[in-house]
Structure formats: structure tokens, C-alpha cells
Amino acid sequence: MTGWQWDIDGWIVLAGILSAVSCALLGNYLVLRRMSLMGDAISHAVLPGLAIAFLISHSRSSVPMFVGAVSAGLLTAVLSQTVHRYGKVEHGAAMGVVFSVLFALGLILIRQAADHVDLDPGCVLYGNINQIPLDAIGSALPPPILNLGIVLLVNVAFIALFYKEMKISTFDPQLATTVGIPADLMHYALMVLVSVTTVANFESVGSILVIAMLIVPGVTAHLLTDRLGAMIAVSIIVAVFSAVVGHVFAAFGPAWIGLPGSTHTSAMMAVVAGGLLLIAVLLAPRHGVISRAWHRLILSLNIIRDDVLSLLLRWQEVRPEGGRPIRQAEVLAAIGDSPLTRWSLRTLVRSGYVMLDRTGRGDDADGMKLTASGLSRATGLIRSHRLWEAYIDKHFKLPTSHLHLSAERVEHYITSEMRDEMSADLTSPQHDPHGRAIPPEQGEG
Amino acid sequence: MSNIFASRHQNGGDDHDPACPVSIHDMTVAYHRRPVLWDIDYAAPQGKLIGIVGPNGAGKSTLIKACMGLLPLASGSVRFYGKPYRAQRQIVGYVPQRESVDWDFPASALDVVTMGRYGRLPWCIPPRRRDKNAALAALEQVGMAEFSHRQISRLSGGQQQRVFLARALAQDALIYFMDEPFAGVDASTEAAIVTLLRALKARGRTVLIVHHDIQTVREYFDEVMLLNMRIIAAGPVEEVFTQENLQKTYGGRLTLLDKAAQAMARIGRH
């Protein structure tokens, strides 16, 4: 491969985009209906349809092939539903049973009756996407591009026109049916489109890309968004990105790492989509690995801040006449010195909960005092801690020495309503089981 | 559908009272030929809160689903103010069980409530501003206005139930079917639902509610239907909700009904 050539690479990327986007659009609904396997099922099950169409029409022309394949696809959808309902097995298993049997039937038919049909397994897997530019020679628009374009237009039109009907029958098919939007009909309309899209994409891009694009953009978008419209938009972006970057990697990637030649575009598009999914799993705002780690970090930071505030209050409690403030070094020794602890001390000062008594002899020698808002927050924490101890002591027969640890864990999560509830239950106690005063509720600081 | 039953009731629908919100005539419902509801005859009184009570497997959800055409009738007929369901969709609202949907669906509370308006819209026409406004008003009524833009999986169970109720309010129906709206909700949601039901009643709506907690029947409902595959008793709570009827509903099934149903399922297969 030399550089980028629009009359070659342009057509390949265009075919990839058309195909990936039309699959991704429908894939959103398959993912939400927990039927992602349907693309896989239909792409296998079309085989007997192709064989029977060939036996009946004695030709490999595309119309009977297309009709045969689409009918087989629909049959898969109907049979899976039937097996699911009457065999009392879950959707995935029902689809698996149906498509493997149909696929096997297709193999037998091809072997026995149509042995001279040349079906190239490589072609079925990756399709002929890299041959599309050859079709472009001598025609303004290569036929595969035209077919893929029509399929995409049909899918876009379906989702745009029936957006509301698809939304309600995907989320709540029972309500849909009761208000007069037949959820069953919408289901089978979707299955027809999945069959047509699968079959139309088969020859040009191959089954791997079809299966990947029916599942991966939808799953990725579901992780990243929480509105249906946004999910569809993101799935389109994932599809287009995978198509473009997939082809660039396939055409030029091997050269970048010093290998000769180029690799297959369809397969590389699927790999890129998988890479995007991996990134989404790491980065997703709510369920993502990184966001969960971040939330854990914030939580442990808050727990340390709470511990420091209660420590400062306890220090003041036992020195009612003032005395010297606790030194930062003593706080660090009590809480455990770590970068996280030092960071939370700085945030406490910055957010105005703690004042520093500068000594000029380095940070560790500085005294730490609660401000008014710090005092209010610390009082709430101590109140939570001691109320909890009293509450547990009243309702469970635990040794008094076990109370502290439990309260230490729970105090960070107790709201003022829960404090009121415990206080009412204990009829406004003055002291915890260790005999220390339970401070009264303060205004929110 | 099933010739076992077909001969029994040929004139279904002729003798329904057009003033009755829901009249059920001789309804039998079967799953895979095995009857789960037998000979249901019932006329719901106008403007009442009606509890449908019975043990697990009594066919409570089946009854309301069959009324709305979600399940086929083996025999009998149901009319809403004298007309079949197809002609009366606009005046019937439905609150399914909360667990019947996937709350991970990418939608806000407002999106879900707006679905209550879809039945009024023609095919392919998206909801308009006044549908959104109706949905917002419904969310307001159940005390969920501040959560209208929250994704539904981030709502608590009680809040999700309120969203379902708001969706039914947005349907603005005359008759409501609710499937266990009190199941698994917190005390404040339970109180909110009761307030809402009373408001619906005050506006003359008829509400049929599948209910699992017999402790609260007297407090919540005007009428009760005691169901266990057939209607044991139905009528005003003070008359019907007796120890004796409860015993009949919950204590020991009519085993003959079970035996007959099994036999029909068995013979039907051959």
C-alpha cells in the first residue's frame, strides 16, 4: 500500500460507514431488548434460506437469494420466540437452539443438494469489502454501495418515523399494547430489518462486522449515555469512527509496525469497535472502572476529613478552658500520615472548616483549630457516633468495647434525620454508653 | 379460541350495562389450555376504589391483563361502559408491576411519564409541548417534579412506583388498573399513593387495584374482590371482607378446580 487513494480507500471507508451505521442503529434496540444475539443468530440461520432459494430458483442471482435469506432470518425470530415461550427457556438459549439447528440444516442442504455452489468461508466471514473499488471501475456508483445505502436509508427512516412506537414497545411492551401500539408487530418489524440488514451486508462486509456492529456500538453507547436519543447518536459516532479508523489501521497499520502488506478492513473495523467498548468500560461516567475508583478515593478522603474534625473536637472537649491547639504532627500521628491525609488536611483548611495557628516552624508544628462551620460539622459527627453507640447498646446485647468500631464505620453515613430518629427512640439521651456527653443537634453549618 | 368452552356462552356482550365502568361476563382464561380463571362475572361500581385480593397464583394479575386484552379469553367478554376494550383504550389507564420493565432503560422520569400520552397521539407523531406539560403536571401530583430529569435507574423503588403512577395520571383515564402499586415501597410512597387514589376517586374515577396486603384492605378500599381462580366474594368491603370469606379465599383451594384444570391441560395436549 502506498498513501491514501480516494478512488480506492474512499469507497472502502464509505461501504464500512454505511454498513456499520445501519447495523448500529438497529443494534441499540437489540441491546435494550436484551436480544443482542439475534444478529449472530440470523447471520447463521440465513444459510438454509440461501440453499433453498438456490434449489428452487436454480440461480445465484441476488433477488431469490435475498428473499430466501430474509425469510430464513424471520423464521429464526419467530422460532426463537416460540421456543422461548413454549419451551420455557430464556431468550439467549432459545436463539442459540434455533440458529445452530438451522445452520446445521443449511450445511446439510448445501452438501447434499447444492454441492456445486461455491461458498467461500473466508468471504462469509469478512466479506468482499476490499473488492468494492473494483466494482467502481466503469460505474459512477458501485452496486454494493448502492445496496448498503438503500438499507441505511430504510433503517434511518424506520427509526425516525417510529421513534415513539419503538421506544414504548422496547421499554414497556405491555403498556404499548394496551394503548394501541402493537408491541409484537414492532418486534417483528425490527426482526425484518435486522434480517434485511444482515443479508445485505453479508456479501460486502461479511458476518463478523455485521455481528460486531449490531452489538458493540449499542453496548458502548448504553454505557456512556442515559437518554435514548443520545444513545443512538453515540452509537452512530462509534460506528463511523470504527469504520474510518478500522480501515486506516487495516491498510496502513501493518506498515507502521514493520510488517508487509495490509490486513482485512472488516475485521479491523470490528477490532476498533471492541477497543472503543473497552475504553467506555474504563471511562463510563457511572458504571466505569475509573469513575468507581474516583468515587472510592473521594469517599476515603471524606472519611479522613471527618476523622480529623472529630479528633479536633475531642481535643477541645477535654480542654474546656482553651489550652494549646493540637499540632498538625499530632493529627497526622493519630490518623496515620499519608499523602491522602495531608491532602485532606489542606482541603479542610481551604474549605474553611479548620484554621491554622502558624508558628513559622514548619507545617507540622502549626496548631489546628475548628472554625464555626468546622465545629458544627464535627458536632454532628460526634453526635452521630455517640447516638449510634447508645442505639446499638439499647437494641443489641454487645460488649461495650465493640460499640466504638461499629460507630466509627457508620458515623460518616448518618444524616440529621437518622439522628433525630435515634434520639427519639432513645428519648433524648444525654450520654453514650461510655458516659460521654452526646452534644445537642446544631444548625446546619 | 378453545372449543371446550365455545358452546357455553354464545351471546357474550349482549347483556352488558353501558353505565358500568367494567363489566366482566363469564370470563375464563387459560394458559396453555390450563384454566387459571374460571367463570368470572363481575360488574365494577362507578367511582370506587376496588381491591383485588387473593393468594399467590390466584390469577389477580391475569384478571386485569385479560380485561385489557393482553391475554386471550378462553370464553366470555369484558366491556368498558358497554363497549369492548378496542373502542375504549383512551379511557383505560394501566399501572403494570414495577418489576415488569428494565429500569436501566436510557430514559428520564419525564420520558417515561410522557409515554402515558402516546396512546392519544397518531402513529409517527412525536409528543408535543402540551404532552410534556401534562407529564410534568402528573409528576408534580405524585411529588416527583424535582426528579423529572433523573435517569430512571437512579430513582429508589418508591420513586419508580410514583413515576409509573404519574404515567397513568398522564393517560387521564376514567378507569384504572393497577398491579400491586404498594409492593416494595417505602412508607412515604405508600401514603402518597393512598392520597392519589382518593383524589382519583373524588374525580369520579374507577380504580381496580391488585393488592397483596390484607391488613390494609379495610383502610384503603371501598370495594373488594376476593379471588382464587374464581370470585369467592365481591362487593362493599364491610359486607364482603369477612373472616369466613377470607378463610374460603386463602385456606385450602377448591382442589377439584385444580384437578379439573390439570385434566384439561392433559387432555388438551392429545
Image (tube, rainbow, N blue to C red):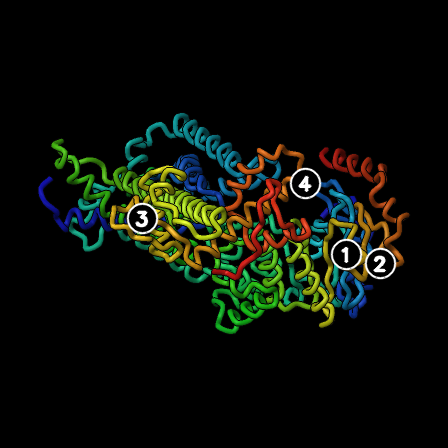
Instruction: Tell me the SS state at disc 2.
Output: helix
Question: Residue A323, position in %: x, y?
Answer: 42, 50
Contact check, label 2 and label 4, Cβ < 8 Å: no
Left or right of A235, for residue A362? left
Amino acid type at circle 3 is Asp
Label 1, label 2: how far apart the Cα atoms are:
9 Å
Which mark, residue A395? 4
Question: What is the three-letter code of the residue carrying label 4?
Answer: His
Residues under numbered marks 2 and 3 in contact, where contact means CB atoms less than 8 Å apart: no
Q: Are marks 1 and 2 on the same chain?
A: yes
Q: Quadrant of residue A266?
A: top left
Q: Name the quarter where the C terminus of chain B is drawn.
A: top right
Q: CA distance from mark 1 to mark 3?
A: 69 Å
Q: Position of residue A102 (x, y in %)?
A: 47, 33
Can residue A210 be spotted in the picture? no
Kindly identify the amino acid type of the residue bearing the numbered disc 2. Answer: Val
Task: Report the residue marked by disc 3.
Answer: A366
- The CA distance from mark 3 to mark 4 is 43 Å
- What's the mark number on residue A370? none
Instruction: Report the residue marked by disc 2.
Output: B237
The structure residue drawn at horizontal position 29% and vertical position 38%, both measured from the top left corner, is: A271
Q: Which mark is residue B51?
A: 1
As helix, strand or loop, the secondary structure at mark 4 comes to helix
- Determine whether label 1 and label 2 are within 8 Å by CB: yes
Given the image, what chain letter belongs to the residue carrying mark 4? A
The amino acid beneath tag 1 is Gly
Q: Position of residue B138 (x, y in %)?
A: 58, 67
Tag 1 and tag 4 share a subunit: no
Secondary structure under badge 3? loop
Question: Label 2 lies in what chain?
Answer: B
